[in-house]
Every structure is written in structure tokens, then in C-alpha cells.
Amino acid sequence: LKNIQSTSSCGDIDFDSILKDYLKNATEIDIFLDFDGTLAEITPHPNNTVTTTSMKNTLLELSKHPEISTTIISGRALSDVEQKIQIDNFTYSGNHGFEILFTNGSKYIHQIPESLSANFSKLLQELEQKVEKHNAWIENKIYSLTFHYHETPEHLKRMLMEQAILIVTKYGYRANQAHDAIEIKPPIQWNKGLAAEYILSHKYDDLWRNRKILSVGDDRTDEDIMKVIKGFGLSFRVTNHNDLVTNADYKIPTVECVQELLDAINRHYLKKQSKCSCKN
Ligand SMILES: O=P(O)(O)OC[C@H]1O[C@H](O[C@H]2O[C@H](CO)[C@@H](O)[C@H](O)[C@H]2O)[C@H](O)[C@@H](O)[C@@H]1O
């Protein structure tokens, strides 16, 4: 495993040669991209998150190559992440994989048992009553919740976070640490990794394991995809922490580096295209 410990820039990672090597005998690729912290910088409030114009153009270019199938897979609600990207030809998955929208318009919703969904509104209500204070708030995504305390005074964060976790576990839900937030999910065996497997088998049946698959993400929920493709896929974890343990093949430090990687993919396919048209 070539786990490059990158420093402050991505200059020492040669995306072109990594891709040339990985794609040497392949024509097609499936790409899974996380949204927050991967395609867009983390901001104090999720409503203020935007992809830069140049990132948007890079994504648009990706969408034009028929050999590339791209999925945006996010913890946000499906409608939210779709609205943030707004590019046709992409598969979108929201709520950490609980919602999937395929390019042909068909939708998959991973079922949550009645006994758990009955607790959801009680959990939401208690969180709203007890921890929505000091600028902390709950994002209701219908299938999961996020407790945000990015804008809470530093000295109150821990107390509020611990209180929220107690409430979440009381109702039998799972609480996972995120960027100044707690991701709250039903305790069922479903995650971005299983959703990625579902998407790939939906498209290619069992043949998906022979395909070239690339994933990029910045947090623990993205590691589930990296685990699934470990050994035959190509994955990149966006992180500044050199000592972070990851399933990814490479660590890259910034959203700008993600764009460099995606630009390199576009270059790779443009080159292939021009070689083909020269031959014809
Ligand atoms: O899977 P992702 O696309 O990375 O989504 C994860 C969560 O992203 C959002 O929250 C995070 O980003 C916000 C905007 O930068 C930031 O304010 C917050 O602190 C982060 O936790 C989103 O609001 C969540 O619903 C997603 O689950």
C-alpha cells in the first residue's frame, strides 16, 4: 500500500502517473465523491457551503466523459446534496447512503424498521428541547440527524455534545463524531460502503468487482467505501493529519488537491479520446 504522507501541498503527489498506472488496462471508471470537506470547504453553517466555480467546471467536465460514472455520496439529505451540485448524469446518494437517486430517475430508500422510525420524532423533539441552545442546532434529514455545534462558544461545546450523545443513545440511535457535529443514525447495518456496493451491483451485477473504482472523502463515513474497495480500488482521504490511520491508498491535504486529482482524471480521458480520434 503506497500510503503517501503528504505535507502542506499536494505538489509531491503525481496524480497523472498514479492514474496512468491504475487505469493502464481499463477504459471505464466509477468514482465516488464525498461532498463536505471534499468537494467544498467546511464552513460554520452547512447552508453556506459552496463548490467553487472551478470545482464546478471540473465536475461538469467529468460528467461529459461516457467512460466515467460518478456518484456524489454525502451525509446530507439527498435533495440537499443534489441541489448543491446540480449536474446531470451523476448518481446522488444522501443520508450516508440511505437515499440513492440513479441517473435514470429511479430512487432507492434503505428501509428503517418501524420500531426505530417511531423513536425518531421523539429523539428529535428531545434534542430540540434540550440541546438546541448556544447556537447549537439540529439538522433534520428525515432518515438521520446532525447535531451542529460549530458556532457554539468553545467552552460549552463538550457539555452540549455529551448531553446530545446521552439523548441519542437513550433512543437507541448511533452517535458519531464529525466536524464540530454529531452524526445521528439509526442502528442498522447500512453505511456509505454498503450503499456504494448497492449502487455498483445495481449497475453491473457481480461484475462490479472487476471494475476500476476510485473514492475520495474526508471523514470516517467515507472510510466505509475505502474499506470495500481496498486492494483493487484507488482511494484518497482528505486530511491534514499525517498520523491518521486510514484505509485509503493516499492522503491528500486539501479540497484544492481533490480538484487537482479530478482534473488529472479529466486529462487522462481527454488524452485517450484524442488518441482514439487520431487513429480513426
Ligand atoms: O458526507 P458529507 O458530504 O461530508 O456530509 C457530512 C455532513 O456535512 C455537513 O456537515 C459538515 O459540514 C458543514 C458545512 O461545512 C459543517 O458546518 C459541519 O460542522 C460539518 O459537520 C452536513 O450539514 C451534514 O448533514 C452532513 O452529514
Image: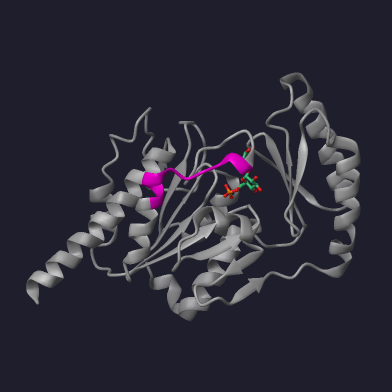
Quadrant containing ligand 1 reads top right
Name above or below for residue 182 compared with residue 197: above
86 relative to 159 in the view: left or right: left
Does the magenta segment cover residue 54? yes
**Screen quadrant of the C terminus:** bottom left
Residue 132 shows up from this direction:
yes
Whether residue 189 appears in magenta in the rendering, the answer is no
Q: Position of residue 114 (x, y in %)?
A: 86, 69
Which residue is located at x 29 percent, y 58 percent? 22
Left or right of 267, for residue 90: right
Residue at horizontal 19%, vertical 67%? Answer: 273
The location of residue 52, given as percent across then percent down, is: 43, 43
Residue 158 falls in image quadrant: top right
The majority secondary structure of the magenta stretch comes to: helix
Of residue 141 and residue 23, the one placed in the foreground of this image is 141
The answer to whether residue 3 is seen in the rendering is no
Q: Residue at x 53, y 72 (%)?
A: 102
Q: Which residues are magenta?
A: 47-56
Residue 185 appears left or right of 268: right
The chosen color scheme is one colour
Question: From the viewer's perspective, is 147 left or right of 75?
Answer: right
Q: Quadrant of residue 242?
A: top left
Residue 21 picture location, percent across and down: 24, 56
Give 69 or 251, whichever is nearer the viewer: 69
* Farthest residue, direction bottom: 205
